[in-house]
Image (tube, rainbow, N blue to C red):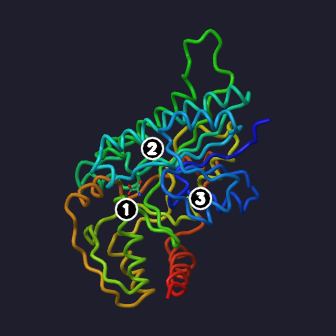
Amino acid sequence: MRKEVILVTGAAGEMGQALIEKLVQDGRDNVLALDVSPIPRETQARCRLALPGDILDGALLSRLVSEFAIPVIYHLAALLSTRAEFTPEAAHHVNVDGTLALLKMAAEQSSWLGRSVVFVFPSSVAVYGLDSLDAKRAAGRVREEQHNFPTTMYGCNKLYCEQLGRYYARHYRQLAATPDAHPVDFRSLRFPGLISAFTLPTGGTSDYAPEMLHHAARGKPYACFVREDARIPFMAMPDAIKALTSLEAAPRASLTSHVYNVTSFSPSAGEILTEVRRAFGDVPVSFEPDLKRQAIVDTWPEDQDDTRARRDWGWSPDYDQRRAFDEYLVPNISRRYAAAG
Ligand code: AKB
């Protein structure tokens, strides 16, 4: 009999590590973790199996299909926005061909299992594209169907993969004699920038917020690569994990869409610095915008409208800006670096 597991790709990443910790806390000790990068030891210890491997490795995915029953997939592996701009085609290959391979595997698993595999996919605020600062200010809180004009390879990948997921959920094998009895149950979240107290991001364009915080906690000078007035939405990592697991658990019948905005707070970079200074004193932070990365941030909305998620599956963040800094970020980051000495 094939053992039943929850597959988490991108397990070595910020979200992957935090998600696996939460799944095990919830008593779900059957995680199969996959990442092309080394998976931290403590995350490995939480998993049924932690595999170094590439989602583009077809032989590996076939082996997983033969050895495991996989009713739930968290497909987190991706090259983030700044990183992807340096190698757009390679990013497309990982972000799109990788997702396609996982969706195909999920479709196969669904027919093997005789029930729809729940496929949870993190999309991003990067799917949006506002073509001027005036348009950004005028747009304010954007809804899912608005301004879907991404300006980065990563944003294009995420938007296309949302469509791919909707295709596998509704139209895959539409010309077959018998319709698919168990289509993939594709569920996607458009995340804002994420801030973790325990890990630092790599290769994103929203990274200035966590970088500023972690540098300040270590008393290190930080040159912020966006302007002081730059504003995009953010969320504390525990809320991102809550959104992933809540959407996975939501009854299928309550979902009216395959794509949901989620968010929590939208401080400007200057307001983030105010929070950082409130916690760590007059830390040496300067604003030295990288005009190219700034231009990307300027196309992202100031805020996302998450009404649909609140209505369909009762979404709400636990950490508003106040709680995020006072109760989660500052205490844990201070402890982390105090322990590191
Ligand atoms: C990035 O900056 O690329 C990511 C994102 C906003 O999706 N953190």
- Tell me the quarter of the image containing the N terminus: top right
Residue 76, image x, y percentages: 52, 49
Closer to us: mark 3 or mark 2? 3
Residue 116, image x, y percentages: 68, 32
Quadrant position of residue 275: bottom left
- Give the secondary structure at mark 2: loop
- Give the secondary structure at mark 3: helix
The residue carrying mark 2 is: 144
Q: Residue shown at 43%/63% (left/top)? A: 201
Q: Residue shown at 27%/54% (left/top)? A: 296
**Residue 193: image tag:** none
Q: Residues within 10 Å of mark 1 (few under 14, many from 20)?
A: many
The residue carrying mark 3 is: 241
Q: Residues within 10 Å of mark 3 (few under 14, many from 20)?
A: some
Mark 3–mark 2 contact, CB under 8 Å? no
Q: Amino acid at mark 2?
A: Glu
Q: Residue furthest bottom?
A: 281
The residue carrying mark 1 is: 206
- Give the secondary structure at mark 1: loop
